[in-house]
Amino acid sequence: MTHSSPDLSIVVPCFRSEKSLGPLVADLDDVCAHHGWRHEIILVNDASPDATWAKIEELARQSDHVIGIDLLSNHGQPMATMCGLSIARGRLIATMDDDLEHRPDQLPALIARLDEDDELDAVVATWPVERSRLRNVGTRVHSFADRVAWGTPRGFRHTAFRVMRRPVCNALVASETRSPVVGPMLTRLAGRVENVEVDTGQRTHGHSGFTTRDGIRRVALNFSSGSTAPLKLMSITGFTLAVIGFVTGALLLTRWVAGADSPAGWLSVMLTVLVIGGANLMAIGVLGGYAEVIVREVRRSPRWSVRTITEGPPEPDDG
């Protein structure tokens, strides 16, 4: 591979994608050749248990455009993406999934929008309708979490299919966080980011590894990494419960002074214990989420661990 900086770096985190990587790389090569872009494709194997790394090595041997990174352990898609960004050398840097749902032939639409407006820092692909009602609900929940926790503009949608300019990539990598939330971080670091609507493809091999549990954890990480809103909610909840307790006590005292029969105490006591106890447990869980993020950051452990890389390119320049 030539050591001159390419026009475009394409970062693809890979997990259980041995069958889709060949068509993906071939399509990316065709698109870049058609537009005359000098490019590199950075495939990051996130400790996939199948033959994904063997396929990446094969593709790297066959093409000067492919760089493979094999991680020692599974770090998750956001960190695998950050690892790929750290060695990307292009003037423009794209990220996309490995399952062909992000279509390579839609990359020109994203890059064209950046070429049209020199003031734009990045563009993020979006599509009008999800194929699953459950995914629609998940998308709305994630958008709400992004907006509350990170200040993402209303109506803006984050996806993993995006193209950014070199300074934005440098800023993301320089953050050095151990809990990256790449999309919201991008819109916080770069003030001029737009959605561009594109067509999506069909997954042809395997199934999505993203589960409902992963979605819940991502929403929780959004809040614990980007906002103190849950802590404020805890304070409001505690204050509200204290007011309810004070008002209830005042009413019972008034009834007693007036000589009215007081209700049996066990019910009110049990309800109070259950409500306050549940609120306390919820608060402990929220604090635990923040503590986990803080410990991870303070520990300063390596953000990722690399077993091998097919070729180590020189450090990216800032041009």
Image (spheres, grey):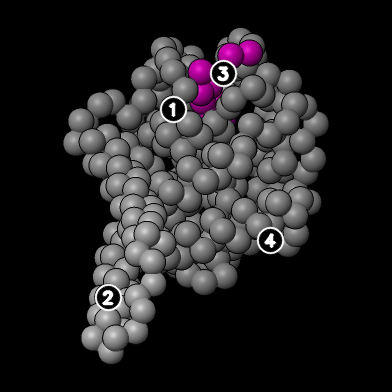
* Amino acid type at mark 3: Ser
Q: Which residue is mark 2?
A: 249
Q: Which of these two is toward me, 32 or 302? A: 302
The numbered disc on residue 48 is 3
> CA separation, marks 3 and 4?
31 Å
Q: Nearer the viewer, mark 3 or mark 4?
A: 3
Is the residue marked by circle 1 packed among few (<14), some (14-19), or many (20+) residues within 10 Å?
some
Q: Secondary structure at mark 2?
A: helix
> What residue do we see at 61% from left, 56% from top?
139
Reading the chain from its start, which is encountered first: label 4 or label 1? Answer: 1
Q: Nearer the viewer, mark 2 or mark 1?
A: 2
| Point 72% across, 41% down: residue | 101
Dot 2 or dot 1, earlier in sequence:
1
Q: Which of the two labelled residues, at mark 3 and mark 4, occupies the earlier sequence position? A: 3
Residue 46: within the magenta? yes
User: Is any atom of residue 233 visible in this view?
Assistant: no
Disc tally is 4
Instruction: Give the vertical position of 79 relative to 48 (above or below).
Output: below
Question: According to the image, label 4 marks what residue?
Answer: 197
Tell which residue pokes out farthest to the left in this image: 298
Tag 4 and tag 2, C-beta contact below 8 Å: no
Q: Is residue 265 magenta?
A: no
**Residue under numbered circle 1:** 75
Extent of the magenta region: 41-50
x, y percent for residue 247:
30, 80
Identify the element where label 1 is drawn: loop
